[in-house]
Image (cartoon, grey):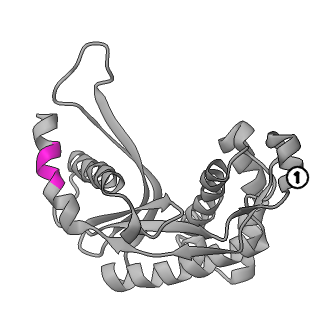
Amino acid sequence: MTNKWDFQAAAGSAVHYILQQYFTKDPDTGKILGDSERNLIIDKINQNIEKDLKEELGSRYREGLYNEDTIEQAIIYADQLKGELRKLHGEECEFYPELGVSSPMHKETPGKPNILMGYIDLAVLDENGKINYYDYKTSPKEYSNFGSAKKLAYTYQLAAYGKLFKQYGLDYKDSDVGILPIQFKELKLSNPEEAHRNPRKAKFEYKTIGWGTELIKREVKQKMQAVDSQGN
């Protein structure tokens, strides 16, 4: 891994993994891991994070993608996020991390896939049966400073996800939709001399992670009509 953007993307996968585990429901208790005691949350995440990330990232895996501080910061953020989402969607709302959704395309193009599918980072079903959904995005910038092209791409992506819920009989037209930015601060090369001799041995480090929640419900609803016209 020879540049910090590759490292940031891989480190983002590590944070994504921690958040996914936090919001995963225990089949025995029916509660999400994040409702457990702090030491149990940390122990559970530490059990498989290295093995699972090596499997997910393959050759992109490097030492230093996460550490104890990363896990602690991610859990603190997840605690805050859980509180915000329960306040917004009701204390009895249900969390579905990494929710896979798919739908057949209305128009088939020869030689191209005819199924639209995607994985939603975090879906939240509220007490009234309305589905709401959120997407983690790793970036060196806050969402307000994302480029217009990137914002447009994310908005269309989330609009397409919303339409997929129609196949499951879920209320999606008034869904709350959000981007959850993950920002690594003070990300820098920690061994410049060694990296200069052998770029593949480059190591990076960061001090803190910036978080946020950007609701983009109005923007996504505006794009749903365009997604409809492309799918019909």
- Percent coordinates x, y for residue 49 in the rendering: 73, 57
Q: Is residue 171 visible?
A: no
Looking at the magenta stretch, what is its main secondary structure? helix
Above or below for 208 versus 219: below
The residue under the point 17% across, 67% down is 174
Residue 117: percent from left, percent from top: 35, 39
* Residue 225 falls within the magenta-colored stretch: yes
Residue at (10% x, 34% y) in the render: 232
Q: Is residue 119 above or below residue 171?
A: above
Query: Label 1 sits on what residue type?
Result: Glu
Q: Visible in this render: residue 36?
A: yes
Mark 1, residue position: 193
For this rendering, which residue is in front, 37 or 45?
A: 45
Q: In the rendered image, which quarter is residue 227 located in? A: top left
Range shown magenta: 223-227
Q: Nearer the viewer, residue 151 or 122?
A: 151
